[in-house]
Amino acid sequence: MLKCMDAAFSLQRELLVGCMYIAGTNAKKEERNGRPKMSEFDDENKGIKPPAYERIVLKNVSEYHYLKIYLEFEEAGISLNPVDFKQLIISALKRLHGEVGAALPVDVLTYEEKTLTAILRVSNVGLVKLWSALSLLGSYQNRKCAFRVIQTSPFLLALAGNSREMVLD
């Protein structure tokens, strides 16, 4: 058992020294209670620490944002075809942001007439304009309605599932 532990420890030490060599450091191994000490360096690298872990965060990796929305009417049984649904979105943008807002490129990727649910694609710069216009829309053909934003993400695949609606057996 002791032989196995010694073999494992020597293998660990060799891997550690190999990693230090790959990282570009020339650290000396100093035996201290059978374990390597990595605090001392060669004369040419005196005071230089080995490279540390570097965290890279990517922002705005996607040029589009995706919204999963549904339209809720006060009365039941109202349906819209895809053209009317898109026109309602454009009119909501026009009401709040004028002609410039109506020119915002919004794509309806999917639309279900039965549930009035859709997935929209909008550029990142237009996300806030679209979201605010949809939130402030209050009526369609003199019938009270409201858009509800279910999910939003810069990745379309993220809208495929919702952990809050997941049923575990």
Image (spheres, rainbow, N blue to C red):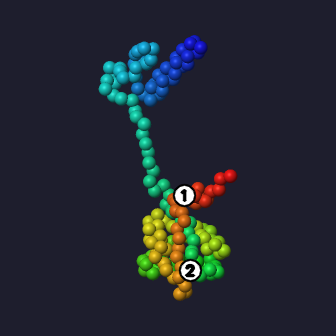
Q: Is mark 2 on a helix, strand or loop?
A: loop
Q: Residues within 10 Å of mark 2 (few under 14, many from 20)?
A: few
Identity, as a three-letter code, of the amino acid under mark 2? Glu
Q: Where is residue 13 in the image (x, y as percent from the top left)?
A: 49, 20
Residue 153 located left or right of residue 168: left
The residue drawn where x is 43% and y is 78% is 96
Q: Which of marks 1 and 2 is in front?
A: 2
Residue 132 located left or right of residue 145: left
Residue 94 located left or right of residue 47: right
Q: How crowded is mark 1: few (under 14 residues within 10 Å), some or many (20 or more)?
A: some
Quadrant position of residue 46: top left
Give the CA distance from mark 1 to mark 2. Answer: 32 Å
Identity, as a three-letter code, of the amino acid under mark 1? Phe
**What's the mark number on residue 155?**
1
Where the N terminus falls, by quadrant? top right
Viewer-closest of 5 and 13: 5
Relative to 65, is 12 above or below?
above
Residue to which mark 2 is pinned: 74
Relative to 157, is 37 above or below?
above
Relative to 60, is 85 above or below?
below
In this orientation, does residue 47 appear? yes
The residue drawn where x is 39% and y is 22% is 38
Q: Position of residue 115 (x, y in %)?
A: 64, 72
